[in-house]
Image (cartoon, rainbow, N blue to C red):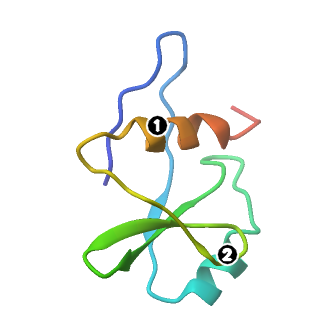
């Protein structure tokens, strides 16, 4: 479970963050959007760090658990359209 503060004026939303060891599964599941929680944030462990799994299955940015601003922005950018 991840709890992020939200920007003033934005309504709190339930989002799904899922860890994956199989990037092919993340790519397949990443094509589906939920009306409830929007796009799923898939993370995978690479060495000792977690990285965001990109839509094409490649590894993206390292997750900085000391500074969740990037994750917060990802959540805002991929928020469900139907709220």
Q: How many marks?
A: 2
| Spot occupied by residue 31 in the image (x, y as percentages of width and height) | 76, 69
Q: Which residue is drawn at 75% across and 35% down?
A: 82
Q: Nearer the viewer, residue 8 or 71?
A: 71
Q: Which of 36 and 17 is in front in this view?
A: 17
Q: Check the picture and name the quadrant holding the N terminus.
A: bottom left
Give the foreground label among 1 and 2: 1
Question: In the displayed structure, would residue 17 be above or below residue 67?
Answer: below
Q: Is mark 2 on a helix, strand or loop?
A: helix
Question: In the displayed structure, would residue 77 be above or below residue 24?
Answer: above
Say whether residue 4 is left or right of residue 75: left
| Spot occupied by residue 21 in the image (x, y as percentages of width and height) | 44, 86
Q: In which quarter of the image is residue 67?
A: top left
| Spot occupied by residue 64 in the image (x, y as percentages of width and height) | 32, 51
Q: Residue at x 60, y 78 (%)?
A: 26
Find the distance from the CA under tag 1 to the CA under tag 2. 21 Å
Residue at image mark 1: 72
Q: Check the picture and name the quadrant holding the C terminus.
A: top right
Q: Residue at x 76, y 36 (%)?
A: 81
Residue at image mark 2: 29
């Amino acid at each position: 479970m991840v709890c992020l503060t939200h920007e003033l004026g934005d309504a709190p939303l339930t989002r799904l963050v899922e860890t994956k060891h199989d990037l092919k599964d993340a790519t397949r599941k990443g094509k589906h959007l939920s009306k409830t929680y929007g796009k799923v944030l898939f993370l995978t462990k690479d060495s000792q760090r977690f990285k965001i799994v990109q839509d094409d299955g490649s590894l993206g940015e390292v997750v900085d658990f000391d500074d969740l601003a990037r994750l917060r922005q990802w959540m805002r950018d991929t928020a469900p359209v139907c709220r």
